[in-house]
Image: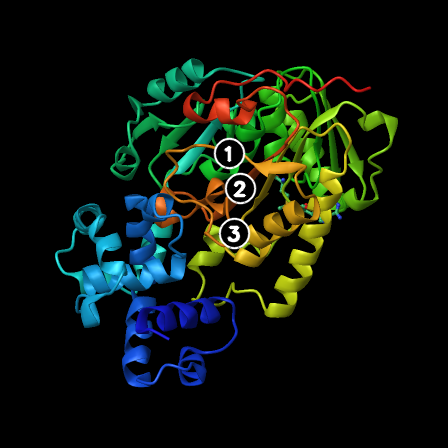
Amino acid sequence: MALYAAAASVLAGVENRQGSIKGLVYSSSFQNVKQLYALVCETQRYSAVLDAVIASAGLLRSEKKLRPHLAKVLVYELLLGKGFRGGGGRWKPLLGRHQARLKAELARLKVHRGVSRNEDLLDVGTKSESVSQVPRFVRVNTLKTCSDDVVDYFKRQGFSYQGRASSLDDLRALKGKHFLLDPLLPELLVFPAQTDLHEHPLYRAGHFILQDKASCLPAMLLAPPPGSHVIDACAAPGNKTSHLAALMKNQGKIFAFDLDAKRLAFMATLLARAGVSCCELAEKDFLAVSPSDPRYRQVHYILLDPSCSGSGMLTRQLEEPGAGTPSKERLCALAGFQQRALCHALSFPSLQRLVYSTCSLCQEENEEVVRDALQQNPGAFRLVPVLPSWPHRGLGTFPGAEHCLRASPETTLTGGFFIAVIERVEVPSSVSQAEALAPDLTPSPAPKRKKRR
Ligand code: SAM
């Protein structure tokens, strides 16, 4: 096996917890173990930097056949290592096409972190630094107020409004009492990271919700129009439910399920505070909700945000490296449930569009769950290519996985997140509603159904 392929395979094995770097290097068939070991260790050391550069350069989006681990090794060699050893073979021209952009993104990262040497990007605090730089996102609750009124309130309190941001760099540069409108999401205000608004009167009155930007994407991408019937399968504590209700202008019906009575009680309080009136809460196992129940006959939209390892949560990422990493057994149990829940959701007969999301970074809970569910329903559903400008895409583990979205502090200035938008294939119009949403995010009308015979 060639050096780069061997290094990529070891990196993938480490990520999938198949063994340590040393163990996997020695059990590989690559002869020069010393060379392989050094390359893997160095690539791994710069992993977060490489992820950020690859994502912002859009490398995996342009080179669909390039697997993420191999990309990481090659970009390490190109930007940080010794250059392509032995000429680089067929990878050299491929990477050559992206060389200028990759170099520019690395330079930008250094400017942003205020460092001049590559090694300085490796500060022990880098991870926690990027986590602590995630801004404070404020979702205006349109059931109770509007962005203009909230902006005016903050201005009267001495904050300075800078208008709509044009890029993530504007968000990164936020300081002091300045705030912005997010460049992508309507009704999402952005404040500097350390801004604490938990005691703010508008928060206490439910006029805004403190919700990470990545966690606002599922409801926005599901985009149920007013009047629709929606299932929120694993709903508590209900931030996404209240977002759905706001998008639906409290018209229609949200059937919200959760197993946990305490979380549901908390959710009921939050929904009341947010002025949500179109939601029916039920303490129920979603897997036991019957798709043939006539109450769900008109359910065209499902949001599935199941229990997950939470490995992308900012608080977990701040812990000791590895402390928040789930064991293989736990991952397997979680993925099993997620898989069953997704297949169950896809069995609702009137379903047109579904959003699957987790706050996990693990491939087993994300791309693999989606891939398996699609394989179990061959030809019936497809992944919708949403938000083409979003820089961090699904890991290229199966064809179409790049249509999924990933999020992280380094690449999108948010918590770690995964989102897949799935749509029934029989939608008659040539362009799907969710795709139509992608460039401008205008809420769409309900998808048209084929007439049932
Ligand atoms: N969507 C929520 C929000 O945005 O606030 C967060 C959901 S949380 C990630 C997952 C939820 O799924 C937990 O509240 C958990 O109690 C619930 N859950 C786990 N298994 C379930 C099941 N079989 N049926 C319904 N809810 C379940």
Q: What SS does tag 1 mark?
A: helix
Which residue is at 60% across, 47% downward? 370
Q: What SS does tag 3 mark?
A: loop
Query: Can see residue 120?
Result: no
Distance between the Cα atoms at labels 1 and 2? 8 Å
Placement of 256 over or under 36, stated as above or below: above
**Circle 1 is placed at which residue position?**
217
Mark 3 or 2: the one toward you: 3
Sequence-wise first label, 3 or 1:
1
Where residue 277 is drawn, which disc sits there?
none
Sequence-wise first label, 3 or 2:
3
Which residue is at 77% across, 34% downward? 348
- Residue type at mark 1 is Leu
Question: Does the CB distance between marks 1 and 2 fall below 8 Å?
Answer: yes
Which residue is at 51% across, 33% downward? 216
Expressed as whole percent of the image width and height from the top left, the position of residue 362 reads 52, 57
Viewer-proximal residue, 450 or 174?
Answer: 450
**Circle 3 is placed at which residue position?**
398
Placement of 233 over or under 427, stated as above or below: below
**Circle 2 is placed at which residue position?**
419
